Amino acid sequence: MKRILFLALVLLTLVPVACDFGPELAAPAPGELQFTVAAGQKYTVAVPLREGGTVQGTLSVSGPENFIDFYVRGPNGELSFGVVRVAGGQSFEMKAEADGTYTLVFDNSFSFGSSRQVSLNYRTR
């Protein structure tokens, strides 16, 4: 009897793993974020997109030096939106070539002493 209960318990815990309904990539609500990127660091924002979907927005940078490198990495780590040195502010729009999570990267790794304050406003379609 104990073996049957054990087997039933094991099977019940495996059922959710065996049932693959596919990933549901719901677009996040429009995002308005403010954050600080420390000197020598990067800050990332993950955005799930379907193939053909877009992420668009604006960002502004402030601090003692008001510029930062910005780019987007695709689901496989590939560069999906080229590196742009944003000075002050920038608008962007990127179209997804495949389903997956795209990563907005705010790169301050070139700085040795100054943090950057970033305001990001984005939406997906």
Image (tube, helix red, strand yellow):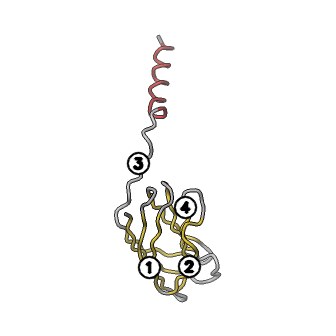
Q: Are marks 3 and 2 in contact (CB under 8 Å)?
A: no
Nearer-N-terminus badge (4/3): 3
Label 1 amino acid? Ser
Label placed on residue 24: 3
Mark 4 sits on what residue?
74
Instruction: Tell me the distance, in whole angstroms, between the alpha carbons under discs 4 and 3.
Output: 17 Å
Q: Secondary structure at mark 1?
A: strand
Q: Who's the residue at 65% across and 81% down the image?
A: 112
Q: Is residue 114 above or below residue 54?
A: below
Whether residue 14 sits left or right of residue 29 in the image: it is: right
Task: Estimate the x, y position of residue 67 in percent, counting from the top left.
Answer: 54, 84
Q: Is residue 96 above or below residue 109?
A: above
Q: Are marks 2 and 4 in contact (CB under 8 Å)?
A: no
Mark 2 sits on what residue?
84
Nearer-N-terminus badge (4/1): 4
Instruction: Tell me the distance, in whole angstroms, between the alpha carbons under discs 1 and 3.
Output: 28 Å
**Front one among 48 and 4:** 48
Mark 4 surroundings: few (<14), some (14-19) or many (≥20) residues within 10 A: many
Label 2 amino acid? Val
Which quarter shows the C terminus?
Answer: bottom left
Q: Are marks 4 and 3 in contact (CB under 8 Å)?
A: no
Q: Who's the residue at 45% across and 29% down the image?
A: 15
Q: Who's the residue at 47% across and 24% down the image?
A: 11
Mark 3 surroundings: few (<14), some (14-19) or many (≥20) residues within 10 A: few
Label placed on residue 91: 1
